[in-house]
């Protein structure tokens, strides 16, 4: 069925009934009568395939029809493979979620957004907990703020029945999650930079004169000179 739908999209040879067509190929474009275009196709042992019927005049190619259909199927397959499937991941909170649970769910939301998925976070109000709806809104706004680097808010928190929803979309659709090796390299580089900074700080400290440095030593010398002058008087 799919092959037939592709095949029926294009007219070929005698199915093309316009007065003239534009032949394209190899960077060239020529307008010729349709009968002449059919003769050209016959001489080359190929088909006249209409690829853009709405153009004026319609655009055609001189190509083997079976080869043309194969190219179209291959192109569609490649385009489909490149399409990123975006899923909606749910994160559920209670109106009085504790900090540990909040951080745990925040971590998962970051991972979902980094993988290119959307996040639907919601606070579920059970029974009389609906009285804490303002608290739930504050929680969702904090959640959105903490994920500002990873996702963008698609709407302010909204109450629907006993649930208050917040929707987040990834800032970079289909962003690839860093591999463990990449994270290890970054951690090693950061540790090395910290070590270098500590060594540099230690060297600067070792070079600093004792008793508060040159300024302090100069002050002590000035005080000693003053006492010596007073004793002479």
Image (spheres, rainbow, N blue to C red):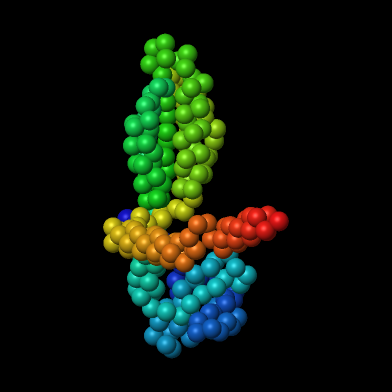
Residue 33 visible in the picture: no
Name the outermost residue toward the left: 180
The residue at 40%/82% (across/down) is 46
Where 69 falls versus 38 (above or below)?
A: above
Q: Position of residue 162 (x, y in %)?
A: 43, 19
Name the outermost residue toward the right: 233
Quadrant for the N terminus, please.
Answer: bottom left
Total numbered labels placed on residues in the image: 0
* In the displayed structure image, the side of residue 190 where residue 40 appears, left or right: right
The residue at 48%/22% (across/down) is 135
Where 49 falls versus 205 (above or below)?
A: below
The residue at 71%/56% (across/down) is 233
Q: Quadrant of residue 20?
A: bottom right
Q: Quadrant of residue 71?
A: bottom left
Depth order, front residue of 74/65 = 74
Residue 135 visible in the picture: yes
Depth order, front residue of 91/118 = 91
Q: Position of residue 186 (x, y in %)?
A: 36, 61
Q: Position of residue 96 (x, y in %)?
A: 40, 22
* In the displayed structure image, the side of residue 57 where residue 162 appears, left or right: left
Where 174 falls versus 73 (above or below)?
A: above
Depth order, front residue of 14/227 = 227
The residue at 36%/47% (across/down) is 111
Where 156 falls versus 58 (above or below)?
A: above
Name the outermost residue toward the bottom: 43
* In the displayed structure image, the side of residue 132 where residue 69 appears, left or right: left
């Amino acid at each position: 069925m799919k092959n037939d739908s592709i095949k029926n999209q294009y007219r070929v040879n005698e199915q093309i009934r316009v007065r003239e067509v534009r032949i394209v190929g190899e960077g060239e474009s020529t307008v010729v009568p349709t009968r002449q275009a059919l003769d050209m196709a016959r001489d080359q042992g190929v088909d006249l395939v209409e690829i853009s019927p709405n153009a004026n005049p319609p655009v055609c190619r001189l190509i083997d029809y079976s080869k043309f259909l194969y190219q179209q199927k291959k192109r569609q397959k490649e385009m489909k493979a490149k399409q990123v499937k975006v899923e909606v991941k749910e994160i559920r909170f209670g109106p009085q979620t504790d900090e540990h649970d909040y951080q745990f769910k925040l971590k998962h939301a970051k991972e979902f957004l980094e993988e290119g998925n959307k996040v639907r976070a919601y606070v579920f109000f059970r029974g009389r907990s609906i009285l804490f709806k303002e608290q739930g809104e504050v929680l969702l706004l904090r959640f959105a703020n903490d994920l500002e680097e990873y996702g963008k808010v698609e709407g302010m928190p909204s109450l629907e029945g006993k649930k208050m929803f917040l929707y987040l979309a990834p800032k970079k659709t289909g962003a690839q999650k860093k591999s463990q090796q990449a994270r290890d390299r970054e951690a090693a580089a950061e540790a090395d930079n910290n070590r270098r900074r500590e060594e540099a700080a230690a060297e600067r400290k070792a070079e600093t004169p004792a008793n508060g440095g040159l300024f302090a030593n100069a002050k002590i010398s000035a005080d000693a000179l003053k006492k010596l002058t007073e004793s002479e008087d």
